[in-house]
Amino acid sequence: MSESGPLVMIVSGPSGSGKSTLVEKILELPGTMLSVSCTTRAPRKTESDGKWYNFVSESEFQQMVETGQFLEYAQVFGKNWYGTPKKWLDAATQQGLDLVLEIDVQGALQVRRRLPGSVAIFVLPPSRQDLEKRIRARGQDSDDEISRRLDRAREEMLSYSSYDFAVINDNLERAGREIQAIAMGSRCRVTRNEDRIREILKSFGG
Ligand code: 5GP
C-alpha cells in the first residue's frame, strides 16, 4: 500500500532566512497548498489576516488547544504561541493536494512524530552577518527582538540533523530551484507510489 494522505512538507529555518520566499516557490508548483498557522503574535504592518497567519487572541488559542484542533503547537521565542490547525490536513486530503507547513523546530518534531512520512526541509542563511542584515533590512523588529531572533537562530540551527534536507539560501534563484526539486523528488518516492506502480505492473500481466 502507498503511504496514504497528503505529502506534508515542513519548512523551518531562522526568521529572516528567506524561508517564506522559498515556501512561495514550493507553492508555485501545481498540487500544493499552504497551511495557514494561528498565532497570538500581533500582525506586522504588512500582514493581513488569513494569508500566512490567522491572528487570534490568547484565549482563542487556548480554546483551540483544549478542543484538540491543532496538529502541533508551540511557544516560539518563549513569547507568542503558534499552531497548525488540523483542518488544513483534512482540506489537503479532500482536495488531493500536498501540504506545506512553515513552522519552527519544536513544531517540526511534533509533526514528524505524528506523520512519519512527512518531509522536513531546513533553510539556512549563509552566515550570521547575512541574517542580521536581512532582519534589519526588513525594518519590522525592535533591537531587542532582533537580538532575540539571532540568538534563537543559532539554537534552531543546532537541530539541523532532525531534518531530511538543507537549503542554504545564499542565492535565491538556486535555492528556489533546490526547494522545488526537493518537493518534486519527494512526490516520486516509491513509498508514495506503490499503488500506481502495482497498477502499471498489472497492465504488464502482474
Ligand atoms: P514570525 O513571528 O517571524 O512570523 O515566526 C516566528 C517563528 O514561528 C518562525 O520560525 C515560524 O516558522 C514559526 N511558526 C509559524 N507558524 C508556526 C506554527 O504553526 N507552529 C510552529 N510550531 N511554529 C510556527
Image: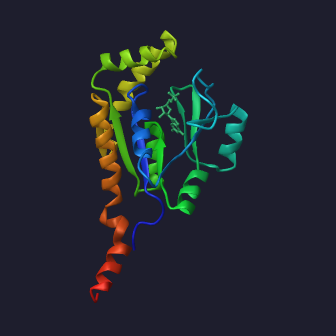
Corner quadrant of residue 84: top right
- Res 7 → quadrant: bottom left
Comparing 135 with 84, the one in front is 135
Q: Is residue 79 left or right of residue 168?
A: right
Q: Position of residue 78 (x, y in %)?
A: 53, 26
Position of residue 15 measured from the top left corner of the image (x, y, whole percent): 43, 27
Q: Quadrant of residue 205?
A: bottom left
Residue at left offset 31%, top offset 79%: 200
In the rendered image, the quadrant that contains the C terminus is bottom left
Question: From the viewer's perspective, is residue 27 above or below residue 17?
Answer: below
Residue at 69% in and 46% down? 66
Q: Residue furthest top?
A: 143
In percent of width and height, residue 47 lies at: 59, 27
Q: Is residue 96 left or right of residue 65?
A: left
Left/right placement of residue 121 relative to residue 57 reads left
User: Is residue 161 at all visible to an observer of this figure?
Assistant: no
Q: Give the tally of numbered discs.
A: 0
Please give the name of the residue rendered at 31% of the width and 19% of the height, measured from the top-left corner: 130
User: Where does residue 124 sit, x and y in percent of width and height?
Assistant: 32, 31
